[in-house]
Amino acid sequence: MSHPKTPFAEDQSKNPPAKGFFEVLLRRFARGSYVLAVLLLYLVASTALGVALAPALWVWGKTAAFGAGWPGAWPWIWVGFSSACCFFIFGLALMSVVPVYNALLPTRFGRFKGGYYTLAAVPWFIHNGLFYLVRFTFLPFATLTPFGIWFLKAMGMKIGRHAFINTELISDPRLIEVGDDAALGGSVRIFAHYGGGGNLVIAPVRIGNRATLGAGACVMGDVEVGEGAVVLPHSVLLPGSRVPAGETWGGVPARRITREEMDEIKLHIKGLMDIG
């Protein structure tokens, strides 16, 4: 009688052969290896957070009691202001600490197709784990600022001159390239990986010069958007999509939108505006 596979019992038939003793152990004890990897990443993340918190705590300790003798509610207002400033000190410090960790730890990875629980996937796991420390804490406050662009570049993302990036919903920055004058609208999601059938696929994403991704568009791994191309809002570019230069694509999944279709869409929008 066959037993249903658990999420940890991946199909190894399509994966590259195991290389070395440690990878054999990792695949044999996938559940235990995964838990251990997560705990180790938590430990590393705790040290990064601790280092970033240190200057904020130092400033708070020096300034929080400054207004203790003030009348009325002013001491509490001062403590609130001091704490808020320390939050931004922590965030900027974290954006400086995480790229250093990313440079020192084994986070170099490239194209890959194989199992989630293989040594080859570990650098990808660490790289994204570090990146998410900032993405889920402070990056929303730095989006559209020079600090946000600097951080993305420091994590390995290639960003051209005058690129407009209005989103923090990014994964795998190391394998993402955005060209000159490209525009990424609000809440655009870009990740250079996808999975299924027990396999993880990691492949680069390239957004060409002067390309535009509308708000909420989703771009998956192994996608190229050509120069001057437009992806309409909330469209989904599936893995392997190639948007030629100058074309407009839209929909789920995204496909080429002809000039006639765009004219119809514009007329429809104009009609709705006239009704309003």
Image: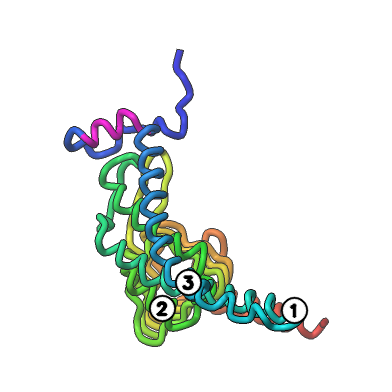
Q: Residue at x 28, y 38 (%)?
A: 15
**Precedes in sequence: disc 1 or disc 3:** 3
Q: Residue at x 79, y 85 (%)?
A: 274
CA distance separating discs 1 and 3: 24 Å
- Of the residues shown, which amino acid type is indicated by label 3? Ala
Q: Is residue 23 magenta?
A: yes
Observer able to see residue 109? no
Disc 1, disc 3: CB below 8 Å? no
Label 2 neighbour load within 10 Å: few <14, some 14-19, many 20+ = some
Residue assigned mark 3: 56
Q: Quadrant of the C terminus?
A: bottom right
Give how far across and how far down residue 179 sits, in percent. Answer: 36, 79
Q: Is residue 167 left or right of residue 274?
A: left
Q: Is residue 130 magenta?
A: no
**Precedes in sequence: disc 2 or disc 3:** 3
What is the image's colouring?
A: rainbow
CA distance separating discs 2 and 3: 23 Å
Residue assigned mark 2: 149
**Precedes in sequence: disc 1 or disc 2:** 1
In this picture, is 126 found above or below 212? above
Residue assigned mark 1: 73
Q: Is residue 275 left or right of residue 118?
A: right
* Residue 122, label in figure: none
| Nearest-to-viewer mark from 1 and 2 | 1
Q: Residue at x 43, y 83 (%)?
A: 146
- Dominant secondary structure of the residues highlighted in magenta in the image: helix
